[in-house]
Image: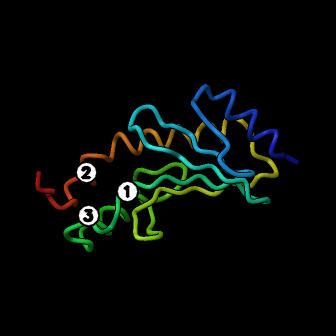
Amino acid sequence: MRTKEDIESYLLRSGLSAREVAPSLWVVDEPGAGEHIVVTLADPVVVFRVKVMALAEVKAKDKLFETLLALNATDMVHGAYGIAEGAVVLTCTLRLEHLDYSEFQGTLDDFSLALAKHYDLLAVHRTKRSS
């Protein structure tokens, strides 16, 4: 059975900047996209989550949702895009019991890749902001 100490060890081993901001809740700084991946230990699972964009920034939600569903079906290995608290989020839930470092790191890597690879594709759905 994996524990909080295993998650802390995986975070340290990853080499990424991470800090525990509450008991069993860490913020990992994703260097490529400059986003913050939140890792939460909620036994019996570990939840990874990153906010991608606020829905208030989206001009045509139906087109965005179609894009997100297509990405979920074709381009995501770990996790999926969803909607939570007025935002598009990327989230993944893994069982803690047999979680190993490779699976943990693979999820962080997949999030980083998705954020970088999908940025332009998702950015076209944002409204233009005036200067």
Q: Is residue 79 left or right of residue 35?
A: right
In the picture as drawn, the residue positioned furthest to the bottom comes out as 62
Task: Name the image quarter holding residue 17.
Answer: top right
In the picture as drawn, the residue positioned furthest to the front comes out as 131
Count numbered badges in the picture.
3
Question: Is the residue marked by circle 2 packed among few (<14), some (14-19), or many (20+) residues within 10 Å?
Answer: few
Mark 2 vs mark 1: in front: 2
Reading the image, the residue beneath label 3 is 57
Residue 27 horizontal/vertical position (percent): 58, 44
Mark 3 lies on a secondary structure that is helix
Earlier in the chain: of badge 2 and badge 1, it is 1
Going by the numbered disc 3, the residue's amino acid type is Glu
Q: Which mark is residue 71?
A: 1
Q: Are marks 1 and 3 in contact (CB under 8 Å)?
A: no
Q: Is residue 4 left or right of residue 83?
A: right
Distance between the Cα atoms at labels 2 and 1? 10 Å
Task: Name the image quarter holding residue 130.
Answer: bottom left
